[in-house]
Structures are given as C-alpha cells and as structure tokens.
Amino acid sequence: MIDILLSTYNGEKYLHQQLESLINQTYTDWRLLIRDDGSTDLTLDILKYYISIYSDKIFLINDNKGNIGSTRSFSTLLEYSDSEYIMFCDQDDIWLPNKIELTYAECHKMAENNTNKPVMVFTDLVLYGNESQSVIGTSFIRYQNMDPLVVNNPWQCIAMSVAAGCTMMINKLAKAFILPMPSELVHDHWIVCNIAFYGKCKYIDSPTIYYRIHNNNSIGINKVTKTYLLSKLLSFFKQVYYYKAMFNTLSFEVNKLHVLFYKIKFNIYRFLGIRLYK
C-alpha cells in the first residue's frame, strides 16, 4: 500500500483534474489522505463528492487545526500515514498515468538495497502553462538549470533545492528522520536534505507530472535569467533567515563553508548560463 498525502487550500479551480489523474493511475494499490488547510471556496465540496464515490480510497483528515500552512499541513499528514511508501501531492498538478508505478518500482528497489535506511526518489516535471493551456517546458530540471545529482552530497543538497515534493516517494523509515517538519522551511527541501545525509536519494530522469504554472502556486517557477538572479540577490536577508533556520533545525552538524561554496558556485554557473545537468 502507498499513501498519497494531499494538502488542499482554496483549490477548486484545479482539484478535479488532479483527483482524476490519481484515479486513473496504472498502479492501484494506494490510498489518498487529505488535509484541508482552511479553504473558503468549494474545495471541501469537491473532496466530499469524490470521497462519496471512492470511500475506500480517499480519506479526509479532520484535526481541527485550521490554517497552519503548507509545511505543517504535510507534516500532520505524514504523522497519520502508516504505509510502507509515501508520496506527496499538490492540488493543482496533473499526474501522468504511470507516475506511481514508475516511482514505486525504483523506490522499492532502493529500499531493498538499503535496508534500515531512509530512501527517497524523485523525478522530473513537465511545465504546463495555465494561461496558454500548453506545455512551456518538457523538463523542470533543465528549464531551471539544476543538477539533480546534488542529492548525492548533503552540502550540495542544502545549497540547491532540486527535488520537488510533488514528485517524491519515500519509505516509511524516512519518517523518523524528517518529522516534525519545521514550519519555517519548505517541506521538500527539508525532506531531501535529511535523507541525503542519513540515507539514499535517487533521481529518475523522466517527468511524471504536469506542473501547472499559475499566479497562485504555493511555490512557483521562474526561468533563470539575469533579472531573476538579481531578484534572488536582493532577497539576501530572506535567504539568510531561511538558512539560519535550516542550520539550527537539522539534527546533524552542517559544514557551512561547503554549503556556502556550493551556493556561490551554483549561482555563478546559472548566472553565466553554464549547464549544470545535460
């Protein structure tokens, strides 16, 4: 059994398509655990409709916590999960039909080869323009000029957040290394940094979802241009706060000089347009 964790918030526009893409998966031994983060639109009505039809597959967690934000919401869902493998789901994407099948095959193999270790696999994404209703990029990794192989080095992993949570699968053992997830940090970055240090991560160089680009994305996509990188530079103080929270919260000692070196190196490469991953 695989648990799929979905945190919703005012997702009425896109939720139907996402739920349909889950139902149409080639791999069927899964259940969907949902936590709503205080929606004020028709999100809950849509969820209740699907639960009424798929009561053996879709479950709504009622914890009365209200609006606690994306990271804490996923952390709560992860605490409820008790399956051997776990996936994370965003409300506005569209999963390709073989997403679970492909990801599970690799994650299960990794878990068998790395007993008593947390493991995580992640994939590429297709970028889908909501306004244009068309594909604007066939590879998130290459569009963003990222190197997915940084997951083999925890310091590089901290310096570059490369794994999208909506493409991840982890094993049950990983929960012990990532819970609780701190609200100041982005949940997918937190997950991959911990598993990169304590266990094993692997990238599957194939897209498994259509990642919808629109104005309301919780974490959006920006093409790496000089203007974009300048804006990142101007957000220096925000970055300092984020990394301070990261360093203070991780349970292992971080080599900050190595992280700083890789952070500068990756940004220079991206600024100059040097490809990090072919």
Image (spheres, helix red, strand yellow):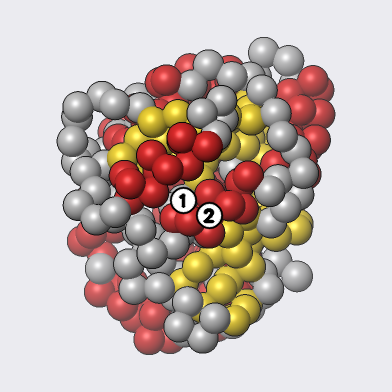
Q: Which residue is mark 1?
A: 90
**With 260 as the anchor, is 67 left or right in this view?**
left
Provide the residue designation for mark 2.
18
Horizontal relation, residue 151 to residue 218: left or right: right
Q: Position of residue 70 (x, y in %)?
A: 32, 44
The correct choice, above or below, for 5 with respect to 251 in the image is: below
Mark 2 is on which residue type? Gln
Image-quadrant location for residue 65:
top left
Residue 5 visible in the picture: no
Q: Residue at x 62, y 79 (%)?
A: 135
Residue at figure coordinates x 40%, y 77% from the top left: 229
Q: Nearer the viewer, residue 187 or 126?
A: 126
Is label 2 or label 1 in front? 2
Residue 185, given in percent of the width and then of the height, sits at 32, 44
Quadrant position of the N terminus in the picture: top right
- Quarter of the image with the C terminus in it: bottom right
Specify whether 236 is left or right of 13.
Answer: left
Q: Determine the CA span between mark 2 and mark 1.
A: 8 Å
**Precedes in sequence: disc 2 or disc 1:** 2
User: Within 10 Å of the Cα at label 2, are there few (<14), some (14-19), or many (20+) other Cα atoms?
Assistant: some
* Number of marks in picture: 2
